[in-house]
Image (cartoon, coloured by chain):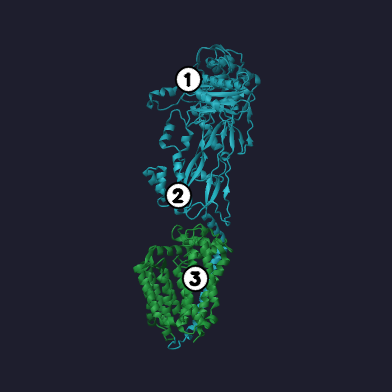
Amino acid sequence: MITLSQRREVGEFRKRYRWMALFVVLVFAGIIVRVAQVQLFQRDRWSGIAQQNITKTLELPATRGIIRDVEGRVVASNRPSYDVYATPRLLQSDDLGRIASLMGLTDADKVALAARIEQLPAERRTHQIQLFRDIDRDQLAAIETHLAELPALDIVTVPLRDYPYATLGAHLIGYLNEVNEADLRNAADPSRYRPGDRIGRNGLEKRYESLLRGSRGFRRVVVDARGRALEGATPDSLDVEMLRRPVPGDDIQLTLDMRLMEAFDRAFRDHPSGAAVVVDIHTGAVRALYSKPVYDPNEMSSGLSTRRYAELTGDPFRPLIDKTIYETYFPGSTFKVITALASLQDGVVDPAQRVECTGFIKIGRQKFRCSKRHEWVDLYDSIVQSCNVYFWELAEEVGIERINRVAHTFGFAERTGIGVNSEAKGFLATREWYQEHYGAFRIGYTLNTAIGQGNTRLTVLQLAMAYAAIANGGTLYIPQVVQNVRAPDGSLSETFQPHVRRETGIAAQHLDLIRSSLVDVVQTEDGTAYKARNREGVLVAGKTGTAQVVGRKGRSEESPSAWYLDRSHGWFAGFAPAHEPEVAFAVLVEHGGSGGASAAPIATAVMQEYFGELHEEE
Amino acid sequence: MAIGRTIRDEFDWPLFISVSTIALFGVLNLYSATDGGTTSDAYIQQLYWLVLGFGVAALTAAIDYRHFERYGWLVYGACVLALILVFVLGKSVRGSTRWIAIGEFSLQPSELMKIGLIIALAKYLHHDTKTGGRTLVDLVIPGLILALPMGLVLLQPDLGTAMILAFIFASVMMLTQLKLRSMVTLLATFVVSAPVTWFYLLKDYQKERITAFWNRLGGTEADLLDSGWHAHQSLVAIGSGGLTGKGFTQGTQTRFRFLPDQHTDFPFPVWAEEHGFLGALLLICLYLFLVLWSLRVASQAKDRFGAVVAVGVGAMLFWQTVVNLGMVCGLLPVVGMTLPLFSYGGSSLLSTMLGLGLLMNVSMRRFSH
C-alpha cells in the first residue's frame, strides 16, 4: 500500500528536458563528426599504420655477382654469413641477458650492448638494428634454438664476399667495406644502400659496383603486437607486397689468367717486392697484373685499426700501393727501344753505322760511364748488349724532342685507360721543364733520357703496352681487364671488344729490326738476358733494364738492412713467343739489381710455364 | 491483477529493444575481441551476466518504484557500506582496490554506488518542495550525499567512477533552478580547485595521460611507447575500419593485440574497425536514442522521484558513453571507463541493468496513481 504523502510538482523540471536533449544531441553529433573524420577522411593514414603494425619486413640481401678469370676460375664469390638483428621495441627486460649468454659475450661486451640499445632514440626502436655480424656456428645454433622465445631477434643470412685466391691480385680485384655517410649521400638511387651495407671500395669491386651489386628484396611476415610471427594468418585487408625476390648482381669474367698470376707469385718468391704485367698483344687484354707485396682484402674489409694501418703504410715495400699502375719508375735501358725507334723513324741514324764504345764518353768535364767496353757496336748490337755509349752518341743527334714525341706515341706520360683504380700518368721531361727546374738545359739531360734515366717515369703497365705495340706491328691498345658481363640468368649482357688507342705509325722494317734485336738479347751469348733464356721450350724476347734508385731520405735512421732499399730496380720487358708473339710483358723486381739477373729469369720462367701449359692443353 | 495488466500494457518496448540490441552487439563484439585469445570464452560469461542482468532489471522494474523511494536511504547506506567494505575485503588490481570477491565472482561496489546515488538524490529532491532559485546552502545536503561516496571512490582510487558520480549529480541538479550568483561561485571554486587537483590529487600516471592527450591535441607526436600508445592504437583501429569495416573477426588491430583492454575499456574501436563507420554510426545512434528516451521517460514521470531517477539513469548512460567514446576517439584523455552494456564486466553490466530496470519502472508507471 503505497501512497506518497503529497503529489510532488514536476512542472519545475519540465522546461529543462529540451535543453538537456539539445545538449545530448550536440555532444553525440560531435562524437559522430569525430568518428567520421577518423574513419572516412583519415582512413588511409590509419590503415597504413594498421598494416605496418602487423607486418615486419625482413630484408633479403642480393647475391653479389661472381668474378671469374679468363678460364672461368672463381676469383670473387660469396659465402653465407649469419647476422643477428633485433627490434628494440620488442626486447623484454631479461632478453639481453639471455642473448648475452647464448652468444657467450663477456660482461664488458654485454654492458656495451645494453648501452648501445639504451641510446637508441624512441623513433628508431621499432626498426631493426644489427646486433652481431657473421656469428660462428655455435652461436648460430644457440640463437636458433631459442629464437621462438626471443621474438625481438631475427637471424639474417647475408652472403659475405670470399676470395678463393686470397691475396693474389688483391689490388686489382679490390675489396668491400661498410658504406659511409658520403656513400649514402652520393648514391644515385638512395634506396640501394642502407647503413651497414657493403660497397666495393677498391679495384674491380669498386669499378663494377653497380653491376655486381644486384638489388635487395624483402619478405614481410605478419606479426602480433609482441612481434611474434603468425604463419598463415595474413588478413584479407592486408594490401601490401609481401615478397620481393632479390635480384642477384651480374657476373663478370676477366681477361686475367689466375694460373699466370700464380706463376708470377712463385717466380717472385725470392724477391720481397716487384710487379709484373702481361697483356695480349692483339687485343690489349690484360692476362696478369701482379704486384707484390699485397694486403689482405679480408683484413681491409673488416676495417683496419690505426696501428695496423700505420704498419701497412710504414712497410718499406708498400703493400698498399699497386705497383703495376699506381707507382712510376725510371725505365732504365728498357727505354732504349724508344730512343732507337725515334732515331729510325726520322732517319736520323743509319742503323748499320758503328760507334766505338770505350767504356765511357766525356761531355764537357762530365764523364758518362758505360757498363763495360763494348768496342765497335751498331744499333742492333747496342740493344742486345745494352751499350750506353752508343745511345749517348745517338741522343746528341736525335734530341730530346724526338725521343719524347715517340715516347708519347707509345703511350707514355698519359694514362693507359685501364679504368680500374687510380692510375699514374708517368712523366717525360721536356727541354722547357729542365730549363724551368734546373736553370738551363744541358745535353746531359738528353743523354740520360735516351737510356731511360733522367726524369722519365712510367708505370709497369705502360711499358708492357708499349712493348705490345712493338710486338704487334705498331698498334697501341687500351688495356682491358674485363672480357664480358653476364646477367644472373647466364646470358651475356656485355662483351668488351678490343679498343685501339692509336696506330703508332712506325714503319714495319724499323719494328722488325727492334724485334729481332730483342730476340737476340735472350738468344745470343752477348745478350744481357742470355743467362735467363729457356734452354728448350718457349723463346722469349725482351730488353733488360736497371733503374737507379735515388732520392731516398733519412737513410741513417733506418735498420742495418736498409742497404737493400738502395739497390737498383731490375727490369725486363718484351714479348713471347719470340717469333710469333702473343703476349707482351713487363717485369720489375724492386731492388733486384741488374734486370738481366733478376727480372729476366722471372719473365722467361713464367712464359715457359704459361705457354708450356697452353701447348699441353692443345 | 491490475498491476500485471498494467505492466503488459505499459511495457516500454523501444527501451527494451534498444537495450537488447546494444547488449547483443556487445556480446558479438566480445566474441570477436577475444577470439583466439586466452579469454576466448569471455562472451559466454557475458551471456550469463546478461541473463542475470535482465533478470535483475525485470525484478527492479516489477517492484513499484515508490518502494525504492521509501527505502531510499537504506539503499544508499548499503552502497556506502559496500564501498567501505572494499577497503577491508577488497583485492588490489593494478594499484587500485575496487573489487570485493564473492565466491567466484568479483563485485565492484562503486558501480552499484551510481544507482545508490541516483536513488538518494531522487528521494532528497522528491521531498524538497522548494521551487525557483536555489542558493548554495540548498546544495549542501545533496552535496554531502555526493561527497561521501565520491570520497570513498577516490580513495580506491577510481577517478573514472568518481567523475561519473559527480556528472550524475551535476546533471540531476540541473533539473532544479540555481541562482546566478551561486552558479558563478561554483564556477570560481572549480577554477581554483583545478590546479589543486592537478598538483596534489592526481597520480603521476594520470598526469602523464593528460599531458600526452594535450600533446596529441596540439598536433605533436606523442611518445608512442607510453601513455600515448593506447590512444594511438585505438585511433588506428577506428580509422582503418573505413566506411564498411574489415568484417566480423577480421580486425587486425584486435586480432593481433594492438588494442589495450580491448574487451573492457576499448570495445568500441574493435566494433568500429570491424564494422566501419556505418556500424559505428548505428551503435552511437542507439546510445543517443537510449539517452533521449530516458529524458522522455523523465518528462512523462508522474512525480519528482521518477523524473530524477530517469534523468539520473540517462545521465549515467550519457556520461559513461561520451567519456568512453571521447577517450577512444582521442577527444579525451585515457581514463578507465567502460562503455555501458557493451563492455565486458559483470558489475558494470549489473549496475547498468539496475538503472535500466528503474527506468523501465518509471516508464511503465507514468500514468498510474
Residue A149 is tagged as 2
Residue found at the very far left of the displayed protein: B88
Q: Colour of chain B?
A: green
Residue found at the very far front of the displayed protein: B1
Residue A147 on image: x %, y %: 46, 47
Residue B51 is tagged as 3
Q: Which residue is mark 1?
A: A593
Which chain is rendered cyan in the image?
A
Q: Is residue B178 visible?
A: no
Q: Amino acid at mark 1?
A: Gly
Label 1: state its secondary structure: loop
Front residue of A308/A158: it is A158
Q: Amino acid at mark 2?
A: Glu
Name the front one of labels 1 and 2: 2
Q: Reading the chain from its start, which is encountered first: label 1 or label 2?
A: 2
A166 over B149 or under it: above or below? above
